[in-house]
Image (tube, rainbow, N blue to C red):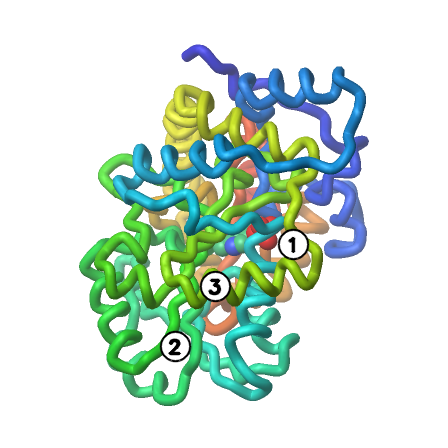
Amino acid sequence: MNYNFDTVIDRSNNFAAKWSEMEQKYGTNDLLPMWVADMDFKTAPCVIDALKKRVEQGIYGYTTRPASYNESIANWVVRRYGWEIKPEWLVFSPGVIPTISILIQEMTEKNDKIMIQEPVYSPFNSVVKQNGRELIISPLVKLEDGNYIMDYEDIEAKIKDVKIFLLCNPHNPVGRVWTKEELQKLGDICLKHNVKVISDEIHSDIIFKGHKHTPFASISEKFAQNSITCMAPTKTFNIAGLQMSQVILPNEEDYKILDSAFIRLDIRRNNAFSLVATEAAYNHGEDWLNEYLEYIEGNIDFAVKYIEENMPSLKVRKPEGTYLLWVDFSKTGLSDEEVAKALVEKGKVALNNGVSFGIGGDGYQRINIACPRAMVEEGLNRIKKAIIS
Ligand SMILES: Cc1ncc(COP(=O)(O)O)c(C=O)c1O
């Protein structure tokens, strides 16, 4: 290994949301944070070097995106997922959820229907409601072995008059990396009913052995024209605090809608740091990412084994992607409230309560294992203390 992922770094004094927002969310900051989806690793050295150089220059005025910025994204997308995109399909956005919110405002009217699949990353639900649109939920189906699949019959039954389908690909929190066949089936239904797909692919780089990320839009020209893809280097390289993402819009009309909305809001420039970090990450960060993926898969395997051996009342399935474990606590004999209380008060560990992910989340907790293995072990010991004793 050329990179060290074992070093524990103190983030408690650094305005990190993961540490400083626990007081507000859990009533105390005295917990080991394994909740919000960022990592406790330093980013790739190539990103740190590019940022240092930028800091040292000392002037942080307005920026202009060079052509090489979008080219670095297009090269990454073809190298990592085999999808050839054109740099001119790309729109810069400070974040995926702001993009989704603006697309909802621009492409739908009040009370229009928008479909999501729960359990899912909770802003999918809130961004629809906060914009005054009607939420249509097609719950994922949980199989006997803990795996999840889409319910196509349910989707077909509910999709009439839906304007937008919000797809989470790969899926947070259940850890599915949707296959081409699954996406094809979903996309055909959306095409048949004239439903635009917004595919949130922010977790597309965190994929484990034996699985492959398929960008929804890469499946066919029809899907490309009927979809908008959101990607970002932020989860991949642990740089969410720099606030950037890219929207891929092969459909010219859709491109114009988003581009003109951002012009109206005057959202068009990267900040000085996201500008250099994105290019550095995508042009030079692949070795780091490959090693990081080995490490994180090691964490997942470690955690799954630990849970199976030490906490048989919990059920967990190895995720196909994402650094999030979706763990079933329903056989502990404790209610959701009792589990949440025990984790905070006895275990001193902060996890995401499954109910916050909507339908199907009850009984579950989401554990973020993107941290040095010693922290994963410490966190699991704390969970055990909370649940078992
Ligand atoms: C599926 C998904 N989409 C979007 C986001 C947030 O993206 P952004 O910070 O770019 O709005 C997250 C963060 O956890 C996520 O898991």
Residue name at image x 63 percent, y 66 percent: 337
Residue 292 in picture, x, y percent from top left: 44, 26
Q: Which mark is on residue 120?
A: 3
Mark 1 or 2, nearer chain start: 2
Vertical position of residue 99 compared to residue 155: above or below: above
In the rendered image, the residue lying farthest to the left is: 181
Front in this rendered view, residue 92 or 138: 92
Circle nearer the viewer, 3 or 1: 3
Query: Ligand 1 within 8 A of label 3's CB?
Result: yes
Which of labels 1 and 2 is toward the front?
A: 2
Which residue, given by chain and number where applicable, does mark 1 sit on?
Answer: 342
Q: Is residue 110 visible?
A: yes
Q: Are marks 2 and 3 in contact (CB under 8 Å)?
A: no
Q: Is 303 on the left-hand or right-hand side of 375? A: left
The secondary element bearing badge 1 is classed as helix
Q: Rounded to the nearest whole Å, what is the CA distance between mark 2 and mark 3? A: 11 Å
Where 71 sits versus 388, above or below?
above
Front-lying residue, 267 or 240: 267
Dot 2 crowding, Cα within 10 Å, few <14, some 14–19, many 20+: many
